[in-house]
Amino acid sequence: MVPGVRLVVLGKQGAGKGTQCVRLSHHYVVPHISTGDMLRAAVKTGSAPGLKVRDAMENGELLGDDLIVEMVAERLAEPDAKARGFILDGCPRTTHQAEAVAGLLLPGALDLTVDIEVPTAQALRRLASRRVCTDCGSNYSVSTPPKVNWSCDVCGGEVIQRQDDTEDAIGRRLELYERQTAPLIKWYESRGQLAKVSGLGSPDAVLRRIIRAVEDRRGRGKAR
Ligand SMILES: [Zn+2]
């Protein structure tokens, strides 16, 4: 079996980050820890914090560092993540969160932070054509719809354009992401923990690039 991995994955919406995280999680046999999924699960419960989360998400705002980090800390402490590692997706988003996440790990435990890069125009195009199952969250697009009449191939649920996938909202999210992430990328770069990987091309090609970046990093670690 391949060794596990401890990986942070960055990338603007539309960069294919979610897809790559799922594939990486299968490749390395580690949990895909997605703060987006965790927050959506919280919203579904309809609890008071869940409703707060929903409002913030609908307005394209980001949630407080403390809430996010607390959620991630709990998940990282579970046995699967402790034993083999994780693919961390959606956190950190700020240098403050990055410092908090680093504090949760042993020194040197993080293998790498991968930034999946695509031009903004391309990300906008991908996002505007995105469609999603309202029941199970499976992703489709205008060019790859479900087989039958916008009913989910996986669960039969209704496949729609998400409310927060309007062009205005997408533009706002991408702009906010760039602004917030620039210092974060510098933060990882200055620690020698960042690899930039092109998100263009097929999902298979992008996955191979990421795996190569991880193996390169490990190779260098051994050579020291
Ligand atoms: Zn579905």
Image: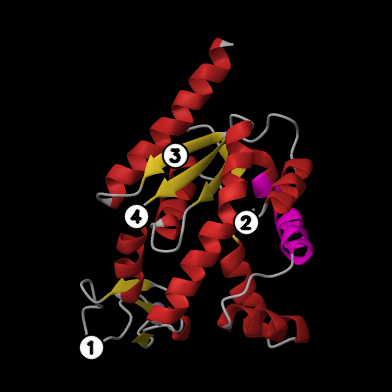
Q: CA distance from mark 2 to mark 1?
A: 37 Å
Q: Give the structural element (helix, strand or loop) at label 2.
A: loop
Labels 3 and 1 touching (C-beta < 8 A): no
* Residue wearing tag 3: 196
Tell me the magenta residue range.
65-81
SS at mark 1?
A: loop
Nearer to us in this view, 24 or 63: 63
**From the viewer's perspective, is 49 left or right of 85?**
right
Magenta region includes residue 74: yes
* Sequence-wise first label, 2 or 4: 2
**Which mark is drawn over residue 93?**
2
Disc 4 versus disc 3: distance between alpha carbons? 13 Å
Q: Amino acid at mark 2?
A: Arg
Give the structural element (helix, strand or loop) at label 4: loop
Local packing at callout 3 (Cα closer than 10 Å; few below 14, some 14-19, many 20+) is some
Residue at 22% in and 84% down: 148
Q: Amino acid at mark 4?
A: Pro
Q: CA distance from mark 4 to mark 1?
A: 32 Å
Quadrant showing the C terminus: top right
Residue 95 % position (x, y): 69, 49
**Measured along the vertical axis of the image, is residue 120 above or below residue 208?**
below
Write down the residue under mark 1: 149
Q: Is residue 170 magenta?
A: no
Residue 78 seen in the figure: no
Q: Position of residue 204 (x, y in %)?
A: 29, 46
